[in-house]
Amino acid sequence: MITLEKRSQPSRVWAFAAPVMAVVLTMLCGGLLFAALGKSPVETIRTIFFDPLFSEFAWFYRPQLLIKGAPLVLIAIGLSFGFRAGIWNIGAEGQYIVGAICGAAVGLAFYPTESIFIFPLMIVAGILGGTLWALIPGILKVKFDTNEILVSLMLVYVAEQLLASMALGALRNPDGMGFPGSRNLAKYDSASSWISENAGMHWGVVLAFVAVIFAYVTLSRHLFGFQVRLAGQSPRAARFGGVNPQALVLICMAISGGLAGAAGLFEVAGPAGQISIDFNVGYGFTAIIVAFLGRLHPIGILLAAGLMALTYIGGEIAQSNLGLPGAAIQLMQGMLLFFLLMVDVLSNYRLRLGKKAIV
Amino acid sequence: MDWSAINPILLLASLMVAATPIILASVGELIVERAGVLNLGVEGMMITGAVCGFIVAVNSGSPWLGFIGAAVGGAILSLLFGFLTQFLLSNQVATGLALTLFGLGLSALMGQSYVGIKAPEFADWHIPLLGDIPVLGPILFQHDPMVYVGLGLVAAVWAFLKFSRAGLILRAVGENHEAAHALGYHVVRVRMLAIMFGGACAGLGGAYLSLVRVPQWTEGMTAGAGWIALAIVVFASWKPLRLLLGAYLFGGVTVLQLNLQAAGMAIPVEYLSMSPYLATIAVLVIMRAGRAPGSLGQSFHASR
Amino acid sequence: MTMKTILAGATIAASLSTTAFADDPTKVGFVYVGPVGDGGWTYEHDQGRLAVEEAFGDAVETVYVENVPEGADAERVLQQMALGGADLIFTTSFGYMDPTINVAEKFPDVMFEHATGYKMADNVSVYSARFYEGRAVQGHIAGQMTESNVIGYIGSFPIPEVIRGINSAYIHAKAVNPDVEFKIVWAYTWFDPAKEAEAATVLIEQGADVILQHTDSTAPQAAAQAAGNVVTFGQASDMAEFGPFPRVSSIIDNWAPYYIARTQAVIDGTWESTNTWDGIGAGMVGIGEITDAVPAEVKASAEALRDSLASGEYHAFTGPLNKQDGTAWLAEGETADDGTLAGMNFYVEGLTGEIPQ
């Protein structure tokens, strides 16, 4: 019988070794899956995990990793504050959408004027939109003690309907021959978030890195970071320690909403280019996984987002080069997440043989 | 607009059917959450149930066997979640989301050769005598058997939680796992059973879509029903009978908005489609939903 | 060796000689918005891809990526396909329009084909199907099959494509049945079986005994079957498994002839940027078998309508037609121009309700 014994301190060795082990396990099991589907396991694994980084076309894929990873990092960093404090905002997808709508609306209102003030205004609108959307569950929790998981999730569906309404109505491109979808902001110089398209750099990528550094400093050096950690570990102690739980809820919701809104704005003004019915592609939900895979630590989140982006991009290459069905990629991503979550136990617990415990 | 076009009897009757998949899935999740576990992977278990049920039903020709297959499939998938969260103490939110991703991929692979096939017929019951009662008959007693299975499950879960000793243990484990453990209850064992029940129910809900509602297999066919089931559990403040209310509210607003559209009322559809979600939030605020099970979402480790 | 195998050998030799290098197959890429297992839109495009493989054998290699979100992801997948050596790429969703144009700029030697859009370039063609021709046939049958004179219509999103279909079906239903009335429900989704089932049920409850759908799942068919006396039509794919009743006919997306022709053009080096909008005539829109549940004379006249649409002697939008508000649109004998049809955002006279904005 194997039992688990809690470590007094999380193991530093396993903190690094565990994710590597998870990736190796995924490669093994994924290899078996691909072999069962009649594909060469070695070639498939190489295509998914290495080709985006080291193949002949890596000059193209590496910048794409930034584009795919940036919104994940931005949203996950924001969520990590709340998650540490035990505040469960799982509606980042909705905040992402509303941020994009608000930001895009500002940009479109100025079209076709060119001015350097337009883009900063759009950023403000995007952050504000996401923040306000996230504050709805926050305020309801504080005022009425409603469950923020449910309210924030409900607001995702509301935001999706709002998005459809905007793409078909208010923000529809007047020159679009009646088709849904707004004008292309990436093609409107004053509103574009691109810095260099070939290098995969847009302002969202820049802000993602800034957010990582900011979060790192806040969590390790700042009083607020201490309060967040305390509230998560021991709500009672936090109250005695002078933490106002209501203010903490609002601040954490605002941070996660603001960053999700910013992610939406940068996406709509750059890589996506326009508000369309299907503008959101699930970054808000994937970011929740990313936040946990990164153990709610800024650097961990950065790495986890990179890994997720890698499997997305590698998965697409495997689909088109090797004829692998998209479902197999999805399954492998699921496996990877399971293994990562599975081995996580090793950094906090020690495996012991013998000694039967009541389970 | 023409109000007379809306027939309230038929509206209520179709509501009974429309609410069935979410009732099935949410009653399972309710037990899971009452045991203190938050499994966000309902959508993944539903779609896996949908494909398992479809495959079994098509190959055996029996929808009943299909539903059994769906329950087994959903339960097996949920074991994965149970193993990770209960034995390896992984985070439940993240594991549940991963389960959804995994289930969507798995079901798509399994169903590859089943696209475009029709499921075997699953006839409605016209319950003798009861089905002939005016008004109530068509609303309540002329549906397919799974509608009653769903209602029966809700009643059974209600009685289980309220009257049985096992239900008491389950609630104790969900409220305070440390105390339950101290009293000698097997926290992890109880939770594993609850998780499997949840998986089986979600599987049934999915199979109701693939075998009765659509009835065909297509990738991603649950289209978010699992998320609604999750919402309804919280809406019901973890009480089985309120679960019915929640499911009918959700189904009802959708059916009503479609009815208003068909009757020619000129309202922006997107805002109507939002309304069930807004209504849920409003009801949550008004009802001040009951407290969640004390240990919901927390990992339990005996040696702590 | 029999005559048949000799002939087969000769055909293979002939087809090999048309490709410049037999060992360097032409690579054709497909980008799909949904999964190939959706049984509808993407499924039919993939059937087209398989037909290309069938037709050219080893001379052509096809690749595809499914479930590609519109926007940034599409642009990356397109570029990756182009880098991977694709000679011709079909992008099969309206939302791929800007990504297609962007990537096409970077790869002038790769040919692109964008479905249902309107932006073209030297190496970007656009193609779409005149599904409204099929809707005309549907309307013609529906108008005569209905006894309640109420026809239910499940719309996906209020966009020109769908509005065109509603207008076309209505005009031809009205022509054979002046008392006909359309009840239109917008589902705001292309694919959500549960919601589609509910929409169909609602329409049936409100008296519709014919259901037309512009969403892709079979859920409305099942709802009609359960109701017992309601007529439906297959959408995107044939849905023949619901025939002969309630499904009495269908509109089938048939991309195979176009995909084969365009691939051939690339192989021959004759590919040019074109704007294709084909209907029943070219085989892009198929009318599924009209079952015996339809009275023989209705079936005959529906087939006659289909054939006149196919030959081009009749246009589905032929005047006199007024817009919903009563203003004149088409004069006697005048036919609608493609520009108006492409951006259609109004109902024709007689339809009730407003197009949601």
Image (tube, rainbow, N blue to C red):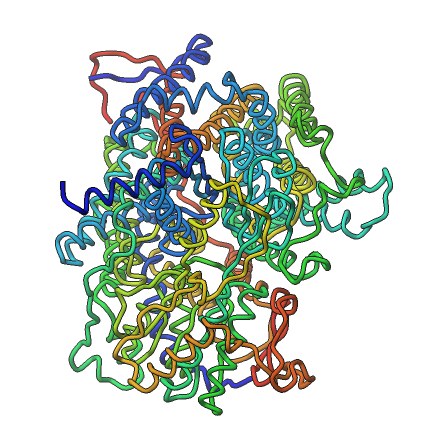
Measured along the vertical axis of the image, is residue A52 above or below residue B273?
above
Q: Which residue lies furthest to the bottom in this view?
A: C179
Tally the numbered discs: 0
Which residue is rendered at x = 40% and y = 23% of the image?
A340
Q: Where is residue C80 in the image (x, y as percent from the top left)?
A: 52, 31
Residue C301, percent across and down? 38, 83
Q: Could you tell whether C120 is left or right of B279 in the image?
A: right
How far across and how far down the image is residue A196, in percent?
71, 28
**Is residue A205 shown above or below C160?**
above
Q: Quadrant of residue B21?
A: bottom left
Position of residue C18 relative to residue B162, above or below, is: above
Nearest the eye: C132 or A299: C132
Q: Residue at x 34, y 68 (%)?
A: C288
Front in this rendered view, residue B142 or A72: A72
Please state, as top left, top right, bottom left or bottom right, where the C terminus of chain B lies in the image: top left
The answer to whether A300 appears left or right of A139 in the picture is left
Looking at the image, can residue B24 be seen? yes
State which quarter of the image contains the N terminus of chain B. bottom right
Question: Measuring 52% from the left and 39% from the top, which residue is drawn there?
Answer: A88
Splitting the image into 4 quarters, where does residue A228 fall?
A: top right
Residue A354 point in image, percent of width and height: 20, 12
Quarter occupied by residue A17: top left
Mark yes or no: residue B295 visible.
Answer: no
Q: In this view, does B6 lie above or below A44?
A: below
